[in-house]
Amino acid sequence: MVNSTEPIFITPDGTIYIGGGDDANCTVSVCPIDMSVYGYRPSLGASGALIALYSLCIIAQVLLGWRYRAWGFMSLMVLGCVDEIIGYVGRILYWQNPWAQPGFIIQIVLITIGPVFFCAAIYVLLAQIVKYISLSSSRFAPKYIYWIFIPCDIISLALQAAGGGLSSSSDGGSQSGVDIALAGLGFQVFTLAAFVVLAIDYAIRSRAVWMSVPRLPRRFVVFCGFLSAATILILIRCCYRVYELSGGYSRDSDALRDQTLFIVFESVMIIVASFCLIPAHPGFVFKTGHEQLIPDDEAMAEKRISPTIRSASDSPE
């Protein structure tokens, strides 16, 4: 008689296989796949394709980063892509043996936290947009965008990593781990939503500035379009992950055990977002970091005042 809270499979010859925990000894050749946490073997083709695509994204970001000296943006993008690659290597390991912990640990932690780096890259770009369009139209200085959103990103990263670590070490059985990961994902959704609201608010407040230009630079329009798409895709993905984890790592969770949902709302959303951030690279618009759409309001005011000062000084006393 075996005392175990984990699922057990007994072969006709009486051999006992345990489908979870430290004593797990199930293999794909013996145990039904339903006994695993996810209830399926991850698609080998999808994982391989994603690893290849993230590798291409890394190459593109390194080349652009080197060309435009955008080291910070490049570092964040490369970190996110490397994180995703290792995560999908974990999915391949999980495909080989859905009951072995290494694959489960790698994919559950790294795929969860990977988009945090892409979010940080996006937050940095809003600060550059503010400098480019109009400083005076922003509710606060661009530096505060870094000081507010980057720490929020770090908090989200820490919570998701800690929650994923606790969950993976317990083969998904730690409710505390699930709750912490959910807190991190929920905080990321809140931060991204606040960022979107701030970006929309700035677009409205600066409307008079960018509407005064006969035609916005094509590169800037393309840049903003792909940046917006990346932001929305990551936000959709985070909402999905909150939904997926709301039932914990239970074998009764339909969301957790639906591979199609995972591929569509996790894999596709994030790989497309990462590729959107290639045409949304800051180097295409902010080559030196000092470009402006039009002269800043203060400079314009100075130009308006200067003729008056000169005429006054030229008038006879």
Image (cartoon, grey):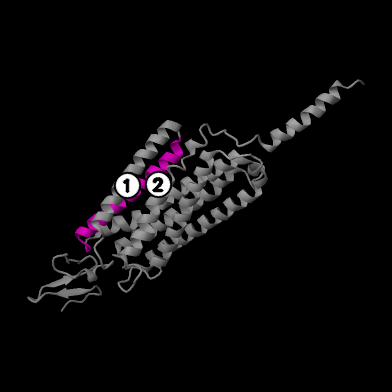
Mark 1 element type? helix
- 212 shown above or below 6: above
Q: What residue type is labelled 1?
A: Leu
Q: Is 110 in front, or is 29?
A: 29
Left or right: where does residue 46 sit relative to residue 2? Answer: right
Q: Which mark is residue 275?
A: 2
Q: Residue furthest front?
A: 214
Q: Are marks 2 and 1 in contact (CB under 8 Å)?
A: yes
2 or 1: tag closer to the N-terminus: 1
Question: How many marks overall?
Answer: 2
Q: Where is residue 152 in the image (x, y as percent from the top left)?
A: 50, 53
Q: Position of residue 243 (x, y in %)?
A: 42, 67
Q: Position of residue 58 (x, y in %)?
A: 35, 41
Left or right: where does residue 203 sit relative to residue 305? Answer: left
Examine the image and state in which quarter residue 26 appears: bottom left
Mark 2 and mark 1: Cα distance apart in space: 9 Å
Q: Is 195 in front, or is 229?
A: 229
Examine the image and state in which quarter residue 21 appears: bottom left
Give the magenta range: 70-99
- 234 shown above or below 302: below
Left or right: where does residue 216 sit relative to residue 39? Answer: right
Mark 2 element type? helix
Quadrant location of the N terminus in the rendered image: bottom left
Would you say residue 90 is visible in this rendering?
A: no
Residue receiving disc 1: 53
Q: What residue type is labelled 2?
A: Phe
Q: Residue furthest left?
A: 13
Q: Is 239 in front, or is 114?
A: 239
Quadrant location of the C terminus in the rendered image: top right
Residue at (45% x, 35% y) in the render: 70
